[in-house]
Image (spheres, rainbow, N blue to C red):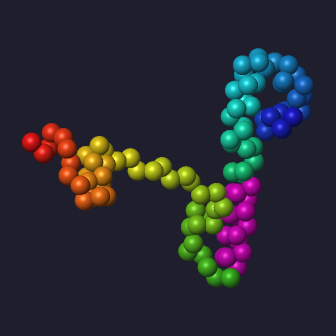
Amino acid sequence: MRLAREFRRHDWRTMLSELSSSELSEWFAFYQEHYFSDVLLDAECCALRATMLALTGHRDIPLQQLSLLQPTVEPETMSDDELMTIGEGLFGGVRYGPDNR
């Protein structure tokens, strides 16, 4: 029923009957991680906070700072050489490999 509400369809039974089982399972898997109204509620909360701050005289704060949902930061991947260099320094050891010959 939340899926029909998300698409603003009042005939949710018809919508569900038109979905195949694979489509339904894909929607189910997708909405396990991405909830329906998180972004909308966050935008409304940002707008409310921005209005309250504007009333107190703070107009130069960007909306991204007021957001409750922060974008996920991808961890930086390191190359093999960087990992080997870090590994050398852990125990003060010597690197055994093509560089030592």
Q: Is residue 61 left or right of residue 96?
A: right
Res. 22 image quadrant: top right
Residue shown at the point (74%, 55%) measured from the top left: 41
Q: Nearer the viewer, residue 98 or 63?
A: 98
Is any part of residue 64 visible from this angle?
yes
Q: Position of residue 24 (x, y in %)?
A: 76, 24
Q: Nearer the viewer, residue 14 or 35?
A: 35
Res. 60 image quadrant: bottom right
- 19 magenta-colored: no
Region rendered in magenta: 41-55
Question: With respect to residue 92, does 13 lie above or below?
Answer: above
Is any part of residue 82 visible from this angle?
no
Q: Is residue 85 left or right of residue 24?
A: left
Q: Magenta region's main secondary structure?
A: helix
Q: Position of residue 8 (x, y in %)?
A: 82, 37
Q: Position of residue 35 (x, y in %)?
A: 73, 44
**Quadrant in the picture for the C terminus:** top left
